[in-house]
Amino acid sequence: MSRRIGILGGTFDPIHMGHLITAEIVRVSAALDEIIFIPAARPPHKENKGEAPAEDRLLMVQCAVEGNPSFSVSDIELKREGPSYTVDTIAVLSEQLRGAELFFITGADAMNDLYRWHDPVRLLHSCTFIVAARQGVELDESRLAEQFSPEQRSRIRIVPTPHLEISSTVIRARVRAGRSIRYLVPRAVELYIEERGLYRAHDKKL
Ligand code: ATP
Ligand code: MG
């Protein structure tokens, strides 16, 4: 049987327990063998607005998944120049992970905007979508029905996930304000942020 691999993209600035808990719930519910976290590139001008450089975002994901054989991280989007289209990332991964069945994990909010993505129809043919449906964020089924055929929509699965009020934005704000982020991120990530002085108001280091 082919390996079932989940792909979780994000800026991971920084990765937090919301990402990890959601990934684990989806992995079990959708019977996935593993999850690959893929930090996204950002336009260079965005990288110095109190946010962390790509290298640090990648290393923080590495810290977070270390020791879990079901989780790993790929630098595929960071190695490419500029931001990547998901459809291209999936194509490269299918090539690399020959024979694996790919599942792209996303939130309901992103899914509602699928028609605005680059080449969504090709994307729906190249992987199965798993919508991590958080309470309070509804999937707009009627809009999806207007944009995509029943066959295309059959590539979208919904997995209920708990609603965790944690975001990278909240974590960056707490660090900036000198407040604790303990238990919001893995311990190793907390230490990394502290050591590197990331997200601090006066830190000009990139
Ligand atoms: P930011 O606050 O900077 O927007 P974020 O917390 O939303 O960051 P991203 O890296 O943008 O983190 O998210 C990557 C993916 O994880 C997205 O699909 C997003 O919907 C999902 N995600 C983020 N936070 C949570 C959470 N608390 N629970 C479930 N999924 C989440
Ligand atoms: Mg976000």
Image (cartoon, grey):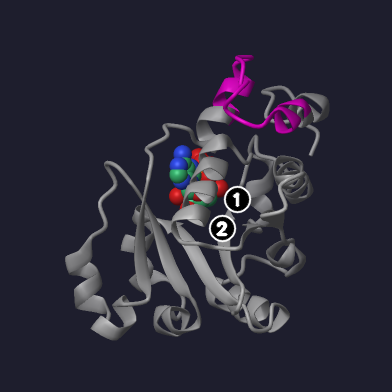
Which amino acid, mark 1?
Answer: Thr
Which residue is depicted at the point 50% across and 66% down? 104
Q: Quadrant of the C terminus?
A: top right
Crowd rating for badge 1 (residues with CA inside 10 Å; few <14, some 14–19, many 20+): some
User: Can see residue 39?
Assistant: no
Location of mark 2 (residue): 8
Which residue is depicted at the point 76% across and 44% down? 67
Q: Is residue 182 magenta?
A: yes
Ligand 1 is within 8 Å of the C-beta of the residue at disc 2: yes
**Magenta residues (range):** 172-191
Q: Is residue 167 magenta?
A: no
Which residue is depicted at the point 78% across and 31% down? 192
Q: Which label number is shown at residue 21? A: none
In the displayed structure, would residue 10 be above or below residue 175? below
In the depicted view, which residue is nearer to us: 180 or 24? 24
In the displayed structure, would residue 121 be above or below residue 86? below
Q: Secondary structure at mark 2?
A: strand
In the displayed structure, would residue 4 be above or below residue 43? below
User: Can see residue 133?
Assistant: yes
Location of mark 1 (residue): 11
Q: Position of residue 163 (x, y in %)?
A: 37, 37
Which residue is depicted at the point 36% across and 70% down? 156
Classify residue 153 by image quadrant.
bottom left
Using the numbered discs, state the Cα–Cα distance from disc 1 to disc 2 in whole angstroms. Answer: 10 Å
